[in-house]
Amino acid sequence: MPLPSNKATSARMSAQRVRDTRCEVVLRRALHRHGLRFFVHRRPIPELRRIADIVFPKARVAVFVNGCFWHGCPQHATWPKANAEWWRTKIERNRTRDLDTDARLAEGGWQPIRVWEHEDPEAAASLVAEIVRGRNSSRPESSPPRPTTG
Ligand SMILES: [Zn+2]
């Protein structure tokens, strides 16, 4: 088998790095070990133009892995001195957008979960698994119909 050319390999690798951060990959593996199935990089709500990193349609749980720099992590936010204003505006915009996304998902009956890239992915996976299982077992369809008294 001929080796792929260097050009093709590096193009593929750089494309992957943009999308799949290490934290995200480890988190996905851990979730698989928990026996969970999910979609990757898709819109939880098709009409809402926001893409979650990990989506559980049945439980309506959307997981976002937030980079500490880009999303202004309270522990690791670094504010570059060069072009400070531009960076601050950009990061603040991401944070505002995150809050807006979470609010819209909640309105649609979804549970958004934010995981910082500095968090332990195994611990995050346990938390996500717990939430997904909890929501799967309390689906509205499986609860008895409400009495129509009143
Ligand atoms: Zn952080």
Image: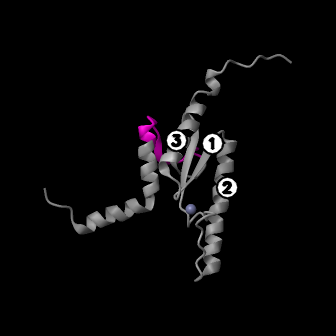
- Please give the label number shown on residue 111: 1
> Mark 2 and mark 1: span between their CA atoms?
13 Å
- Give the colouring mode of the picture: one colour
**Image quadrant occupied by the N terminus:** bottom left
The nearer-to-camera label among 3 and 2 is: 3
| Boundaries of the magenta span | 31-47
Front one among 124 and 38: 124
Question: Disc 3 on helix, strand or loop?
Answer: helix
Snapshot quadrant of residue 108: top right
Q: Is residue 141 left or right of residue 32?
A: right
For label 2, the SS is helix
Mark 2: which amino acid? Leu
Q: Is residue 45 magenta?
A: yes
**Residue 44 in sight here:** no
User: Residue 5: image x %, image y %?
Assistant: 21, 66
At label 3, the amino acid type is Ser
Residue corresponding to mark 3: 126
Q: Is residue 100 visible?
A: yes
For disc 2, the neighbor class at 10 Å (few under 14, some 14 to 19, many from 20) is few
Q: Seen from this angle, which residue lies furthest right?
A: 150
Q: Circle 2 is placed at which residue position?
A: 99
Q: Secondary structure at mark 1?
A: strand
Q: Residue at x 70, y 43 (%)?
A: 107
User: Any magenta on residue 35?
Assistant: yes
Label 2 beta carbon less than 8 Å to ligand 1: no
Q: Is residue 90 above or below residue 55?
A: below
Ligand 1 within 8 Å of the CB at mark 3: no
Residue at x-position 67% and y-position 48%: 104
